[in-house]
Image (tube, rainbow, N blue to C red):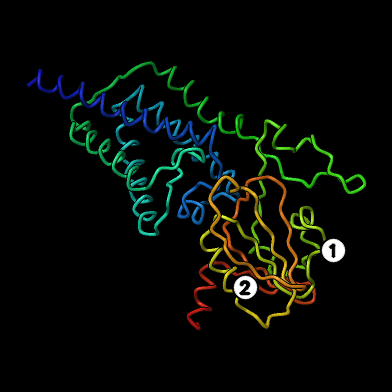
Amino acid sequence: MTDTRTGLQKYAALAVRLAALWLATGALFKLFAGSPKMLPELVRDYSPFPTWTLTFQVAIAVELSIVCIAVLKPHWGWMWITGTFGFFLVLLTGMMAKGVASCGCLGDSVSLPPWVMMCIDGVLLAFVLATKPWKSLAPPGLSTPLLALGIAASLALPWIVIQPQDAVVPPLTNGTEISGTPTDPQKSPSRVYIQWDPIKWKNKFIYDVAEFTRLVPEGKIPSDGRIVLWRQSCDHCAKHLREMADEKEATQPILLVQVMDDLKSGRAVDAMPVGAHVTTVELPPGEGLFTTPVEIRVAGGTVTDVLYEEDFEKLRAGK
């Protein structure tokens, strides 16, 4: 009986640590090569934290802390690993149902379909549970001081590595951009984010929304009309802009604001409204921490409504 438990204990510790290493891989990819816009929609929508950036930092800190516990104290870590991987499987199931192309688990630089990540996570979780760690693993594990040090480092790293700056429009001299400003993403070690929450602009005077007018020239903002935030690779943006392009008799001023964080991706947008009533603006380089498309409706300079994809679907359905 003792030999059986000893053998199972070895496999259980191995299973927990293998899962921890895979979790560490994802956390480190997100830390060094990811951005908050890769957070799953469910996490973004129900996060108790006020910004995507803070949610992203907390998520990485939690994952790295779980890795430390699982590696050094697998008799505790298996519970955290089981809960974490179970949560991941729920998220991945939702992504598959929505047809998401990449889960974002390995940051922006690696595209991995949700079903592939689900297979990997599922196998690792099954390996952990098959070894019955609740029976086979027992204290004390490895160094407790090292665990405390590892958790402290895990909690600090996301705030040390991820130091976001706000995107700014480079100053102009005789119509020429001056490069090399402190927030130039090509020269700055910090990450440049555009953290907007357009729904909070509702009922505000659009020209008083400082975060918007800081990046979009006031002379191009319509006091009566529609402002659309869009990305070139966004299928939903393509659909909405195509429908706007089909509005042949439309003359209401339209401002199209392009988010420039997906230029390496393929272009989905194939039609856009054109005419004297249409103005276009490109945001400066930076990660747009908001979903697109977003349509902001303005009347008398006041934001009267902010519409997202689900709102467009209701309008199409006549609801």
Reading the image, the residue beneath label 2 is 245
Q: Position of residue 287 (x, y in %)?
A: 63, 46
Q: Position of residue 212 (x, y in %)?
A: 74, 57
- Inter-mark Cα distance, 1 to 2: 23 Å
Q: Residue at x 75, y 66 (%)?
A: 279
Residue, far right = 174
Work out which quarter of the rendered image holds the N terminus and state it: top left
**Number of numbered discs on residues:** 2
Identify the mark nearer the N-term, 1 or 2.
1
Q: Position of residue 132 (x, y in %)?
A: 18, 33
Q: Is residue 65 left or right of residue 121?
A: right
Q: Position of residue 284 (x, y in %)?
A: 72, 48
Amino acid type of disc 1? Gly
Q: 15 or 222: which is nearer to us?
A: 222
Which secondary structure lies at badge 1?
Answer: helix
Amino acid type of disc 2? Ala
Q: Label for residue 314?
A: none
Q: Is residue 171 left or right of residue 127?
A: right
Residue 312 vs 34, above or below: the answer is below
Q: Can you tell which quarter of the image residue 229 is in?
A: bottom right
**Which of the two discs, 1 and 2, sits closer to the camera?**
2
Q: Residue at x 37, y 27 (%)?
A: 21
Q: Label for residue 219?
A: 1
